[in-house]
Image (cartoon, rainbow, N blue to C red):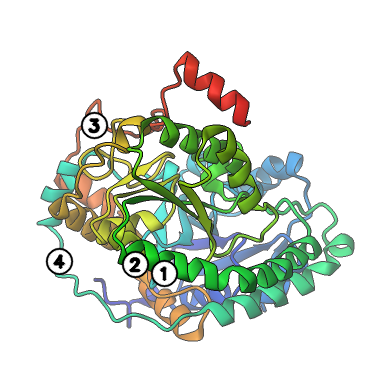
């Protein structure tokens, strides 16, 4: 890893533009650290909450979505930016910036929740998840991993959940003034903060009601070693659904998976559906699962839980189905076979299941531990930084570990690909259609009934 302590003046020719960050002081701390290394830093604020979390001077953007390309074109034309840093490359305010920056030859760094959560943050050039440049050829990783420096795994960090909640409330509270100060701002979140918090409060009371049931159900399933598959859901507004899958909504995902399970899973198996812990609760998944289960005769074979220790569930599951959740990394770590129904960085031959959902139920296969270790090592080295985005300790670590990657002219992934070229193979997923169910006429008829 490159030492940065006394090398600040080497970066005076770099000009970083920071776009929208997340609901924490991470971007302000990162910007200050970049400036301390001698580089120039500019910031664009898109709403009043951004302004409150950025203490210095900034560029105010009050352009509508239709006028954002013109805004960025003017900005790039007036300034010689070398690098752009943003959180979430699928946000409406970021998509035109990413496209234009690539045309202008500006390096683009995307920060996201880590591929291996907790304790890791994704910092990747050009794109993440379905837009990632990480190869989809598992054998390449076995070779590439032998070229990596020694990477001792760090200690686990304390949970930053409380800090995350506090920053979320603070960010949204200041956002009340957006109507007057940033009237053209368009959030990537499709619901108002008042509706979101109301729904969260209702969910809290609902969790109290089902806490005992869900906990006992998981314990019983594991104790009696009943065979089951696990389906992990994602937040309905998540970019993994909206941009990196063929699903329009969670209902479509549930229907597709449950139709396939009803027709092809061994009759003695169960399907446990786990909701996302941060889901705001707008969708009543229990009612939805019951609605879909009845015409499929799955009422006694499918159970939705909102509380449950994921590692325990993964240790006992026959396999896991998901779209593109970070739970994939956890599942593979626990030797649980996975099928990813979206454009996931993990979706590659010999790592996750590639023969379609219908066949997954009867023969999910086994996790290739060697390939997973190689993939994990390369992912951590090239796209992951140790730290967090909300707690003070996590932010300090994430900022320190982000700097070496930000100041490299050639990314670590580019360096590995230059040393070890990766020739794509036909079975690599890439941008191909994810391995959904193949709909026969009879299956399509069943699906139309439950939808």
| Residue indicated by mark 4 | 149
Earlier-in-chain disc, 4 versus 2: 4
Q: Which mark is residue 424?
A: 3
Is residue 219 at least partly visible in the picture? yes
| Residue indicated by mark 2 | 312
Residues at circles 4 and 1 in contact by the CB criterion of under 8 Å: no
10 Å crowding of disc 3: few (<14), some (14-19), many (20+): few
Residues at circles 1 and 2 in contact by the CB criterion of under 8 Å: yes
Residue 213: percent from the left, percent from the top? 53, 68
Which mark is nearer the camera, 4 or 2?
A: 2
Q: Which of 95 and 231 is in front in this view?
A: 231
Residue 301: percent from the left, percent from the top? 45, 46
The quadrant of the rendering that contains the C terminus is top right
Earlier-in-chain disc, 3 versus 1: 1
State the CA–CA distance, disc 3 to disc 1.
37 Å
User: Which residue is the extreme one toward the right?
Assistant: 180
**Residue occupying image coordinates x 54% and y 58%:** 86
């Amino acid at each position: 890893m490159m030492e940065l302590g006394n090398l600040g003046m080497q970066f005076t020719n770099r000009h970083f533009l920071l776009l929208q960050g997340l609901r924490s002081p991470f971007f302000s701390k990162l910007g200050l650290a970049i400036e301390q290394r001698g580089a120039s830093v500019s910031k664009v604020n898109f709403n009043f909450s951004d302004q409150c979390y950025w203490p210095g001077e900034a560029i105010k953007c009050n352009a509508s979505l239709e006028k954002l390309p013109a805004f960025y074109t003017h900005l790039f034309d007036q300034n010689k930016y070398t690098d752009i840093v943003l959180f979430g490359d699928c946000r409406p305010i970021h998509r035109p910036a990413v496209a234009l920056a690539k045309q202008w030859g500006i390096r683009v760094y995307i920060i996201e929740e880590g591929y291996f959560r907790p304790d890791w943050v994704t910092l990747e050039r050009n794109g993440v998840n379905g837009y990632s440049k990480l190869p989809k050829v598992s054998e390449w990783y076995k070779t590439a991993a032998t070229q990596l420096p020694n990477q001792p795994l760090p200690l686990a960090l304390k949970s930053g959940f409380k800090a995350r909640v506090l920053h979320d409330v603070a960010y949204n509270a200041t956002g009340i003034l957006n109507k007057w100060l940033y009237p053209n701002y368009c959030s990537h979140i499709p619901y108002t903060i008042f509706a979101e918090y109301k729904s969260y409060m209702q969910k809290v009371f609902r969790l109290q009601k089902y806490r005992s049931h869900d906990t006992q159900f998981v314990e019983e399933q594991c104790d009696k070693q009943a065979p089951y598959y696990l389906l992990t859901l994602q937040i309905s507004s998540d970019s993994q659904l909206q941009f990196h899958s063929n699903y329009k909504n969670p209902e479509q995902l549930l229907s597709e998976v449950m139709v396939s399970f009803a027709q092809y899973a061994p009759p003695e198996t169960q399907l446990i559906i786990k909701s996302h812990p941060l889901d705001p609760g707008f969708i009543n998944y229990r009612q939805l699962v019951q609605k879909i289960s009845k015409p499929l005769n799955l009422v006694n074979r499918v159970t939705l839980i909102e509380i449950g220790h994921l590692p325990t569930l993964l240790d006992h599951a026959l396999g896991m189905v998901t779209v593109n959740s970070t739970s994939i990394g956890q599942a593979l770590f626990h030797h649980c076979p996975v099928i990813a129904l979206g454009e996931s960085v993990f979706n590659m031959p010999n790592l996750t299941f590639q023969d379609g959902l219908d066949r997954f139920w009867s023969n999910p296969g086994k996790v290739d531990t060697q390939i997973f270790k190689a993939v994990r090592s390369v992912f951590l080295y090239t796209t992951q930084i140790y730290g967090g985005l909300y707690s003070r300790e996590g932010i300090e670590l994430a900022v320190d570990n982000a700097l070496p990657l930000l100041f490299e002219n050639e990314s670590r992934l580019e360096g590995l690909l230059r040393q070890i070229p990766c020739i794509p193979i036909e079975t690599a997923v890439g941008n191909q259609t994810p391995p959904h169910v193949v709909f026969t006429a009879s299956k399509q008829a069943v699906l139309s009934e439950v939808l």
